[in-house]
Amino acid sequence: MTHLPELHGEHLWLRELRAGDLTAFERIHTHRVLTRYLGIDRMTDREAQDAFAQCLAQPFTHPRRKHTLAVCAPGEETMVGTMGLLIEDYGRNAMLTSLVLLPDAPVRGHGHEAGRLLMAHAFGTLNLHRIWAGHRADHTRMRPVMLAAGLRPEATLRELFHTRGAWHDVTTYAALAHQWIPTATAAEQTILNGGDAPLLT
């Protein structure tokens, strides 16, 4: 079993999905607006339930490649969003995925922190070298989120995925461990060091 530890930041924290998160998961993946810019189409209730079951099984796969985590507000257990990491089969690379926050989430405006917490775990415990992420080229509100997470612009991948009857270009960003780690906050440094004292002072 490969459960991730809880990853705590200043404005939010990440944890593994739990059975009680189904309602929030369904709300996200069946929502007409929240799924607009995702790389998958809006799901039916049954499709969302099946996808949720697959996410719950992720910690029991070996080697674990997919990590779908719940975003929570500090001091709260209720899931208010999702954040994911997909570890690639080659090299020491991974992709950040599935950052979605519910419209009434108290952590809105801090989505980049979810990415940073997961990147700290990936660069630290998972010993990854490169992490990348992308957004639909027409979803321009995501650019500041990517930059705040410490990701640098790279390229445009033309017609990468097909949703809602159309092909979409994706703008990509990436961070390298040796460049990102010196920018880590104290909380991120603790995660990088496996929960011990910060690496940097």
Image: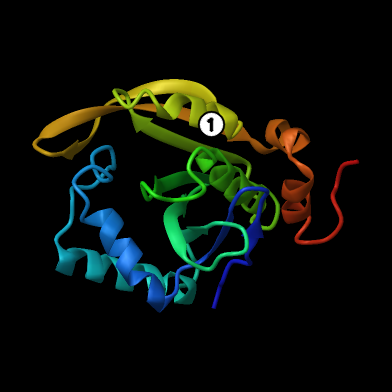
Residue drawn at the location 49% of the way across and 50% of the way down: 106
Residue drawn at the location 32% of the way across and 27% of the way down: 139
Q: Residue 1 location, x and y as percent?
A: 54, 78
State how the image is colored.
Answer: rainbow
The C terminus lies in which quarter of the figure? top right
Q: Amino acid at mark 1?
A: Ala
**In this rendering, would 63 be left or right of 138?**
right
Can see residue 39?
Answer: yes
Image height of 78 relative to 151, above or below: below
**In this rendering, would 5 be left or right of 84?**
right
Observer-nearest residue: 160 or 115?
A: 115
Residue drawn at the location 23% of the way across and 64% of the way down: 48
Observer-nearest residue: 163 or 126?
A: 163
Can see residue 67?
Answer: no
Observer-nearest residue: 37 or 124?
A: 37
Label 1 residue SS: strand
Q: Please name the residue that numbered disc 1 is placed on.
A: 174
Residue drawn at the location 23% of the way across and 39% of the way down: 36
**In this rendering, would 193 be left or right of 176?**
right
Q: Residue 37 location, x and y as percent?
A: 27, 37
Image height of 123 relative to 50, above or below: above
Image height of 46 relative to 66, above or below: below
In which quadrant of the rendered view does residue 20 lie?
Answer: bottom left
Q: Residue 61 location, x and y as percent?
A: 45, 73
Image height of 15 relative to 149, above or below: below
